[in-house]
Image (cartoon, coloured by chain):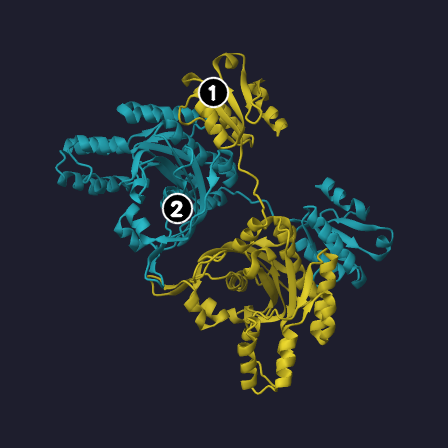
Chain colours: A yellow, B cyan
Amino acid sequence: MRREAALFGFREISTPIFEHTELFTIKSGPNVVEEIYAFQDKGGREISLRPELTAPAMRFFVNELTNCPRPLKMFYFGQCFRYERPQSGRFREFYQFGAELIGNPGPESDAEVIALAASIMRRVGLRQYSIRIGHIGVLRGALAQAGIDADQAPPILQKLDKKEYEEAKARMAEAGISSGEVERIIEITKTRGPVEALDKISGEAKDHLAAVFRILSDYGFTNVEVDLGVVRGLDYYTGLVFEMDAPVLGAEKQICGGGSYSLTELFGGERTFSTGFGIGFDRTLLALEREGYEAPPYHIDAYVIPVSEKMKDEAFKITARLRQEGISAEVDLMGRSISKNFKYAASINAQRAVIVGEKELAQGSVAIRDMASGEQRLVAIENLVPEIRCDQ
Amino acid sequence: MRREAALFGFREISTPIFEHTELFTIKSGPNVVEEIYAFQDKGGREISLRPELTAPAMRFFVNELTNCPRPLKMFYFGQCFRYERPQSGRFREFYQFGAELIGNPGPESDAEVIALAASIMRRVGLRQYSIRIGHIGVLRGALAQAGIDADQAPPILQKLDKKEYEEAKARMAEAGISSGEVERIIEITKTRGPVEALDKISGEAKDHLAAVFRILSDYGFTNVEVDLGVVRGLDYYTGLVFEMDAPVLGAEKQICGGGSYSLTELFGGERTFSTGFGIGFDRTLLALEREGYEAPPYHIDAYVIPVSEKMKDEAFKITARLRQEGISAEVDLMGRSISKNFKYAASINAQRAVIVGEKELAQGSVAIRDMASGEQRLVAIENLVPEIRCDQ
């Protein structure tokens, strides 16, 4: 994930594990305190273990990076904490990988960020994933047309986000929206399908999404669909919103969420145009596991065995030389017999044993034993490093 | 640091940011709570942000790894937290890199761990560092000989560790040690010098340290001295203890501390023989900085510029291809003019600009501009990846 982000020109940032609680309540409202690890420190300060990394990243930007050239491309990988009931792929301490791009409101910025999230999933080897893209402006526009002002919209949007249609309908009715309008709004959130689904909407949002789809296709991503039901209830989203799913996870399938937003002015900075995403790292691992992904097995290049007490000094010297040349090596630390050493070498998946014997050493040589085939050959000590390199 | 540890056959472990407070009070005594971030969570549990990583590593070992073959070699890198006054190279949140080896009490294990710490410093490019090695058994033996039992020793050892000789003398006098014995004990803690200094002591500790010095010399480390003043006040140290200094840091010069210890039985496991160290990562960075170390400057391989709106699709396609082939690339996301794009490319230290123009594209080519020399040449798009690879 880190390597892919670097290939896109994103640079890693690192922010503290805890922040002033205010940072998170400013972003997500006072109720967030119920769901996070919030404390008072010995100095009476209200602090919280970070529940997510967008707010810290934007605080860091406002404090330190506002003079950097734009677009500014940052990524991060680290632990986050939520006080909630642990369940499959959902822990109280979890890892988030995310990226934020601060640039302009054009479709290029949004497409770049989505392409990064998708490229990461491709690069880590996830076989099945899909991208759903919506635009917060469509529903906000429809609500505005129905006479709902910006203050009234969030509670309705939150219900629509969770697809709790009955509650959403009730709230819209309370707010005085006619039942015909209510149905039309519900209908919008159910708009989903290939790029042609954009024909059902119009205006700025449509043009923006069409441009994003086109760039994503240039980038080689076609597993993308329109989903105007992606709402992401929070106020600070400003336009495009997106989610990624790993179908192998079943009901809890979302592995990434993001969109364009504006937070910097909440943290005392100037208004900026930003787009970002957060990947649920633990869920992504779970998805890879469910798809049968196997991590390459651990191995070590060489295990060095002195055949007797006298050979130990030479064994340590050889081990040091291998390591300095970038060849991973262990050496007997337990004073074991040769056969027990072979057993240990197998347990750490050593590719070869280097056996330091008295007779061989007298001729300036050691024996290399291929641990898989059991084949053994003599090698001059001065040729040991190139021989092992050639093997690999 | 991670790479060097892997070359030694150590494997990375990762433990939670917070633990039950008890884990740290068991290891370091109840007073440690004053110096750490200790809280109650919403469920009334006493938890603490980890102040160090040896206790978590050993808890993890006892819970999960006791059946692994020995020696078991683990390393870790992560944030730790102490509630103390921040100062140069000393932060409330800091990074620790450490390793633990669980094996046997032989000098091979201790030497391996010291060699890893020293190899890390060499590999990261620290020019000046030294290793001081002592043995807790020497002072403990002298105190026992003077009639002090194991319970009375720690407060005396703590004063000797801090080189607070007057207080140490007072405590020894209180405990009934004769003034001649007191002087002899103080003298021991001042024993310092090359390996020959070992002649001043005798017994098991001497033989053990002599063997460690010999193996370290096999490993190629000669910047090692005896220092019986290395005490490391805590009870769980069992034998060899060591510290590393970066003289460039002046008074606060210690960048690494470690030794052999036994903690597992405190955490409900069987007694084990372990040796480990912790490197103060932030102080090591500070030492590198003071020595004038310069990190390689950030750069990106290519910056792709479409000369007109029409060329954008091709620019995105080329960018995607470069990234997929492992060439780091950015593309204009801001719709800038060519000259502004060159300015941005320089600001991100792009090695070359790839200019997508209409005429050139009609011939299946793009222009590559070397950003350092300003030289520009035409390259067929199909040759772009190999051409950039050859350049590098």
Judge the density around disc 1: few (<14), some (14-19), many (≥20) Cα neighbours within 10 Å. Answer: some
Q: Quadrant of the C terminus of chain B?
A: top right
Judge the density around disc 2: few (<14), some (14-19), many (≥20) Cα neighbours within 10 Å. Answer: many
Q: Quadrant of residue A341?
A: top left
Residue at (52% x, 71% y) in the render: A266
**Left or right: B339 as drawn, with respect to A272:** right
Q: Amino acid at mark 1?
A: Glu
Instruction: Out of A328 and B130, give the one closest to the viewer.
Output: A328
Q: In the image, residue B169 lies at what x, y percent?
A: 18, 39
**Left or right: B239 as drawn, with respect to A134:** left
Which residue is identified by label 2?
A: B53
**Left or right: B89 as drawn, with respect to B389:** left
Q: Chain of mark 1?
A: A
Instruction: Out of A341 and B354, give the one closest to the viewer.
Output: A341
Q: Amino acid at mark 2?
A: Leu
**Left or right: A281 as drawn, with respect to A337:** right
Instruction: Out of A321 and B87, give the one closest to the viewer.
Output: A321
Picture disc at residue B126:
none
Q: In the image, residue B139 lies at what x, y percent?
A: 24, 33
Residue B164 visible here: no
In terms of secondary structure, where does tag 1 sit?
Answer: helix
**Compared with residue A313, is residue A140 higher up or lower down, i.e. above or below?**
below
Residue at (26% x, 52% y) in the render: B31
Picture disc at residue A314:
1
Q: In the image, residue B149 lies at what x, y percent?
A: 17, 36
Residue at (55% x, 69% y) in the render: A263
Residue A130 visible here: yes
How many discs mark residues in the rendered view? 2
The span from disc 2 to disc 1 (Cα, nearest Å) is 34 Å
**Compared with residue B173, is residue A385 higher up or lower down, i.e. above or below?**
above
Disc 2 and disc 1 in contact, CB within 8 angstroms: no
In terms of secondary structure, where does tag 2 sit?
Answer: loop
